[in-house]
Amino acid sequence: MSHRFDGQVLVVTGAGQGIGLRAAQRAASEGAKLALVDRAEHIHDIAAELVKSGCDAIAINADLETYEGAVNAMDAALLQFGRIDKLINNVGGTIWAKPYAHYAPQEIEKEVRRSLFPTLWCCRAVLPAMLESGNGAIVNVSSVATRGINRVPYAAAKGGVNALTVSLAFEYAEYNIRVNATAPGGTEAPQRIVPRNESSQSDEEKVWYQQIVDQTKDTSFMGRYGTLDEQASAILYLASDEASYITGTILPVAGGDCG
C-alpha cells in the first residue's frame, strides 16, 4: 500500500459502518492518524482494532446533527493530535424511501437534519483549525441521488451538500483549503449495525425501496452497484495530496449514473 497519509491527521465521521468505516480502514493502512467519529458506541471497538493493527486512532462519540456535537468532535481530535489535516464528512443516508406525497412533515425535517446538517456543522467546526495551520482538505460524501425517485427530502439535503462544497471551496481556496465531494451511487454493503430507520418496512415500503434499486441499476452505465472499496478509493484520492490541484469538484462514483 502507498503511504499517502503518513503523519497526517484525518477525521472521519460516520466511521462506524459502511463507506465511512472502509475509508477509515484504508486510510489507516496508508499511515493516517485517525479520529473516528460516530454516535454509536461500537466506534470504540473499531478504534481499538485499528490501534491493534498499529494505527494511531481514537474514537469520539458525537451527535453531529448539532453544532455542539461537531465542535466537540473537532476539539477532541485537536486535543489528541494537535491538528486536523483532512476531514471526511460521511454522516447521512436515506431514512425513509417513499413518494414525496407520503412523507410527513417531521420526516422531511429528519431527513434534512440527517443528511445535510452534519456536513454543514462539521465544515464550520473544522475551519478554525485549518485556517490556523494554513492548509487542509475536506471531502464531503454526497450522492448521485439528487435526481431520483422516492427520496425527495434526501435529494434536497444532498443537493445542499453539493452547493456547500462548491461555495466553501470558492471561499477558502486562497487559504489553501481544498473542498471536494464524492457522489456515490448504489453501493453494496453489509447489513447496517445501526439501522437508519428502526421501524420495519411495510410491504408497500418494500416496493418503493425496490423501485429505487431498479432505477439505480437502470441508470448506471455499468448496470450494477459499486463496492465499498470503490467508494473509499475516490474519497481518499480527493483527500490526498495527489489531488492538490482539485477543489470545488463533485465526483460521481456511480458507474456512469449521474443522478
Image: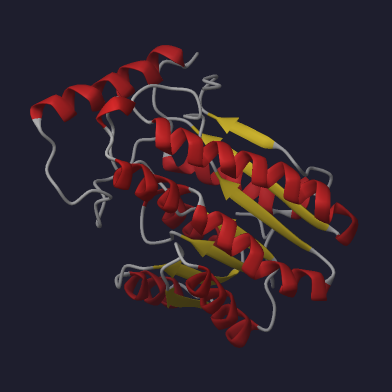
At a point 56% along the width and 36% down the height, the residue shown is 159
Q: Nearer the viewer, residue 206 or 159?
A: 159
Q: Quadrant of residue 96?
A: top left
Furthest-front residue in this view: 105
x, y (%) of residue 7? Answer: 69, 73
The residue depicted at 85 percent of the width and 53 percent of the height is: 173
Establish if 103 lies above or below 63.
above
| Residue 5 relative to residue 187: left or right | right
Spot occupied by residue 140 in the image (x, y as percentages of width and height): 59, 49
Residue 61 in view (yes/no): yes
Residue 119: percent from left, percent from top: 55, 55
Q: Quadrant of residue 211?
A: top left
| Total marks in image | 0
- Residue 5 position within the rendered picture, expressed as x and y whole percent measured from the top left: 67, 63
Q: Is residue 107 left or right of residue 73?
A: left
| Residue 177 placement, left or right of 96 | right
Quadrant of the rendered structure where residue 42 is? bottom left
Residue appearing at x 70%, y 78% in the figure? 83
Where is the N terminus found, in terms of image quarters?
bottom right
- Image: 29 above or below 51: above
